[in-house]
Image (cartoon, grey):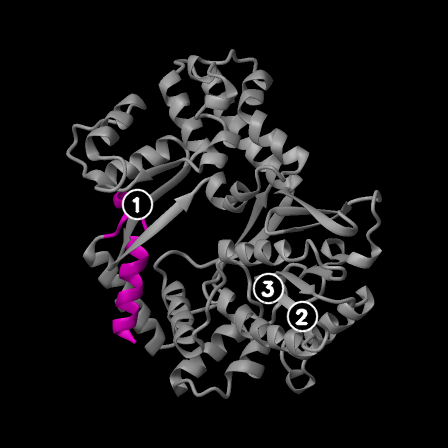
Amino acid sequence: MKNELQKIAEYQNALLPLHERKTEQAIKDAVDNAEKAYKDRSYNFKNYSTLKLRQGSDRRIVKMYSPFSSEELLCIYLKRVLDKKYHISYPNRNTFIRSLFDTIYGLKDMSDYVIFKFDFSDFFNSVSSVYVYQKYIKEVGLERFQSELLREFVESTEYAYAGLNTSNILCEIAAKSFDSLVMQKFKDAGLILYKRYVDDGIIIFNRYISKDDCVACIQDAIKEAFYDCASANAASCKVELNSGKTAYIARRNMVVGGNASEFDFLGYVFVLNAKIGGKTEKTEFQYGITDKKIAKYTKRINKIVREYNEAPQKNMELLRHQIKAFTHRTVYRINRYKSVIWKSKGFLSNYCELRFHMDELTPKTEKFLKEVVRDAFAINGVALPYFMTNKDGESIYSLYNNMRKYRTLLLVEMIGIDCGALKKMCSQVGIDVTTGKGYDGLVRDYLIKVKVGH
């Protein structure tokens, strides 16, 4: 166990910015403390902090252990034990979305289909970790000491609270059973796509199935996966469908010239209209992002312009770089412990599928992409700067143009922006390039300065 704790502590330390990283002695002390706490049972898994985070209009309750505390290191150790035992493959958002777009493309000429989208309410905080342990983990053959440590952990925490390192895998262990049950129940109903991303699910059928039947099957799967009577002595799960985020669309209910149908999934919005194509009816699709995400990114660019306007010393070059970063996809690499991780950030990265459907955008999304940056100046009473006076069709500071051309800031030496160009960029935004920092250090400073984050 000590070797695992050592690896965990070193990895956690590698995640920190350079100026916050702990010394080798501090890491050794943390590992020794965790090992001692395990041996004499002095750890206390109830010793977590509760934070209330606000994300727009949403509020989340998060539980966290103190960094490098014995409880945090042991919690991460248990996560790694479960990772190795269950080989859980965590979903990739962009891969899921690509599958959805590919499937929807095939629906255009189909005479009948059903789309059913569902969502769980407060998923993490509703999954009983004690229940998951008793139903899915207790008998799978963990080492005896591992199983006992996990039992103490789940009995202390009770639920898979957001913020705890084990919560994701505990939820996924139960949710994988739910997935299997759903696919089994719908196997003879014309199922052509089933995807679940944490608490959001989408199901597409190539024939008609009623909304009541969809809901009933999902409810049955929830009951079997999360409310097994054999585990009734465990703390009860509270998993339930969020009726306010359920969407049901049946092709046969759509009427040419009638109201559009729509659903959203992972920040994208899909709008469906019945149209006449030749002698047959077809479905016309439009794609965009949700109002919530439009508000999020509008708020972000407005903040950038407002901070520029309110600054005692207005730095036009910094503003230019911040807007350029906001309207581009940013790609860079970071070293994490003994591996290299590629990062892709920004609106263009998060909604990359839209670039293949620029002629099929929802009006609200098209307006947002074309006007959000210019609107930010008008809202804050700032005259358009020199770099924004280009014609719209030529501007590299437009989300719409950059989405169409998929413009990228490739901050990777040898294949992207070279060190000399990066130093020039850093100097333009007020970063000292004479301190001898390497390429990766300059990338970090630049991304923080232009509000991309690192």
Q: Is residue 333 above or below residue 144?
A: above
- Which residue corresponds to mark 1? 17
Q: Is residue 18 magenta?
A: yes
Name the element at disc 3.
Answer: strand
Q: CA distance from mark 3 to mark 2?
A: 11 Å
Find the magenta span and give its range.
Answer: 1-22
Looking at marks 2 and 1 on the same chain, the residue that comes earlier in the sequence is marked by 1
Figure quadrant of the N terminus: bottom left
Q: CA distance from mark 1 to mark 3?
A: 36 Å
Q: Are marks 3 and 2 in contact (CB under 8 Å)?
A: no
Name the element at disc 1.
Answer: loop
Residue at 36%, 65% in the rendered image? 73
Residue at 66%, 72% in the rendered image? 237
Q: Is residue 430 magenta?
A: no
194 displayed left or right of 423: right
- Which residue corresponds to mark 2? 191
In which quadrant of the rendered view does residue 379 lie?
top right
Going by the numbered disc 1, the residue's amino acid type is: Pro
- Which residue corresponds to mark 3? 195
Answer whether residue 315 is visible to the viewer in this image: no
